[in-house]
Amino acid sequence: MALRHDAKTEQLTVLVVEPRAEDLERTRVTLATAGFRVVPVTRFDAAAPLFEAIHPDAVVLAAQGPDYVAVAVARRLRQMSRGAVPLMYLVESADSEAHRYCLSKGLGVDVASRTGSDSGEELVLRLRAQLRLKSSVRRAMLPAALPTPVDGSPIGADLLPGRGLVLSVS
């Protein structure tokens, strides 16, 4: 099942850090087909400068042992964004050690399978879920819209002693 882009939504930018060219291309195509603008990079040391330059909406990092460089890069990107940009690890579906390592050391970063029959769909669904969560949190942080008084008085002035209740009929 291919997840296509909905034309009504804006195109979001995803930085993909994957050292293996073939896997990078597969991930790029999967995300582009789903409607994301993809900025691919094969070197982990290029992730932070690119992150600062393009300000992506999300980052996908390939994680593999034995050094798990992706975890250190994720830590740096999390600091740079103050936790505001969703990060996701890609791991081999058969690599239970990498999956476990990323979940235990991964700073709460989500994990998706890099390979497998539904890996592309899983990545897109998890990424969209992370972006919806980010959007919901941002909306919740906005100040609530306060009602505007009909007579132009400060909010709450209708409750002052001797003022009475102000009503207006249009």
Image (cartoon, rainbow, N blue to C red):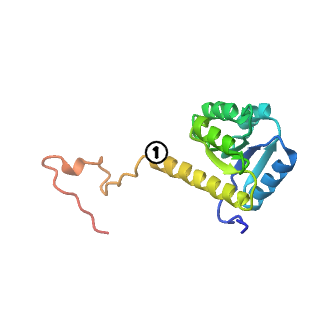
Q: Is residue 11 visible?
A: yes
The image quadrant of residue 4 is bottom right
Residue 117 image point, x, y percent: 74, 62
- Considering every residue shown, the one lying at the far left of the view is 162
Q: Nearer the viewer, residue 130 or 110?
A: 110
Q: Quadrant of the C terminus?
A: bottom left
Residue 52 against residue 116 in the figure, above or below: above
Q: Nearer the viewer, residue 58 or 72?
A: 72
Residue highlighted by disc 1: 141
Residue 80 against residue 138 in the figure, above or below: above
Q: Is residue 49 left or right of residue 164?
A: right
Q: Is residue 142 visible?
A: no
Residue at x 56%, y 40% (from the top left corner): 108
Amino acid residing under circle 1: Met
Residue 67 against residue 123 in the figure, above or below: above
Q: Nearer the viewer, residue 6 or 156?
A: 6
Residue at x 69%, y 40% (from the top left corner): 55
Residue 122 against residue 23 in the figure, above or below: below
Residue at x 60%, y 34% (from the top left corner): 105
Q: Quadrant of the N terminus?
A: bottom right
At numbered mark 1, what does the secondary structure look like: helix, strand or loop? helix
Number of residues whose C-alpha sits closer than 10 Å to that of mark 1, classed few (under 14), some (14–19) or many (20 or more)? few
Residue 66 image point, x, y percent: 74, 33
Q: Is residue 170 left or right of residue 84?
A: left
Residue 80 image point, x, y percent: 63, 31
